[in-house]
Image (tube, helix red, strand yellow):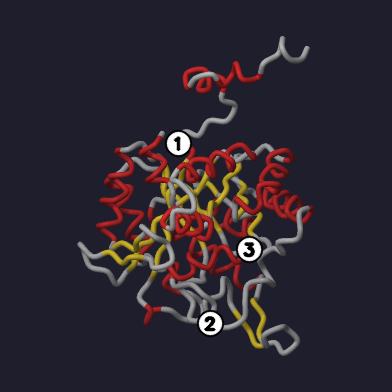
Amino acid sequence: MNFPITRMRRYRKNSKIRDIVRETKLNKEDLIYPIFVKEDLKDGEKEAISTMPGEFRYSLNDCVEYAKELEAKGLKSIIVFGIPSAEKKDEIGSPAFASTGIVQRTVRKLKEETDLVIITDVCLCQYTSHGHCGLIEKNDDTDFGFEILNDESLEYLAKVALSHAEAGADIVAPSDMMDGRIQALREILDENGYYNTMIMSYSVKFASSFYYPFREAACSSPSAGNRKSYQMDPANALEAIREAELDIIEGADFLMVKPALPYLDIIKTIKDEFTLPLVTYNVSGEYSMIMAAIENGYLSEEAIMESLLSIKRAGADLIITNFAPYALDHL
């Protein structure tokens, strides 16, 4: 049938009708808030992140207090990014797996004072003197005169994950993109009795320019070169399926696509191909781009919820986003 029998505007005639026929719904439990904890900050101090309007680096105690505020609004999950003292960084990223590290101490306090699901970022880039996600070695045959070592890095990434599990993390989330890291993490966790610590893999992580604000926020920019030898080429889609499939075989409990908005097609592809819960990271550049447009009057705040809905509609089950505080107030 067609017009005038069929009138699609009947579904849109008022807000009550629109609400009950809405196909895609964003819920508070879909949101994961990424928080930055800086070791050098004292209680009561927070640093504005210049590239991310309205976002801050927190001291340990202030991080926990803010997490409690968000939990009271309905937040269920948080992912912790640590920023160690600059003088502690070294070639192997040892502050990342120290039992007294900033993430480990934050996790313990969050577990004591909240009921949030605690996720931790497992990587070396914030903790290494060179800013790469794995160990490096001189190699004149590469683009920059050095190589990011894959297999040698797995031992240290596994140490990071174990230290987070020992601190009480519910989920560890490796973001390094080294081959075989899911297997390495699963093995060390199981060997030490952490069978129920879950792995949220950054399975499909593209070498994206949309990460720039985060690197400023986390003080994690590489001192030389770039990350294109281990993060994915933005032009590739079939490769994303292979990356996700390998992570499933190695023992991942969640898959992830990062970034989100420029890769909605990849989100849909991964969701259609696999049955694991799918996480997407609405990354810093996406956040800052929309916030800048709102601040300049080019967009209204309605763009925030529209963008999050688009990610959910593409197939995401969970969304890591700096927009979580705003969304909690509007859901």
Residue underneath mark 2: 223
Query: Which quadrant holds the C terminus?
Result: top left
Query: Which quadrant holds the N terminus?
Result: top right
Q: Is residue 312 left or right of residue 139?
A: left
Amino acid type at mark 3: Met
Residue drawn where x is 21% and y is 63% of the image: 43
Gap between marks 1 and 2, in whole Å?
37 Å
Mark number displayed over residue 29: 1
Residue drawn where x is 58% and y is 73% of the image: 134
Quarter of the view holding residue 39: bottom left
Residue drawn where x is 36% and y is 36% of the image: 74
Residue underneath mark 3: 177
Instruction: Give SS at disc 2.
Output: loop
Q: Decide which of 282, 249 is in the foreground and name it.
A: 282
Q: Residues within 10 Å of mark 1 (few under 14, many from 20)?
A: some
Indicate the position of residue 34 as horizontal and vertical percent values.
Answer: 43, 54
Residue drawn where x is 39% and y is 44% of the image: 326
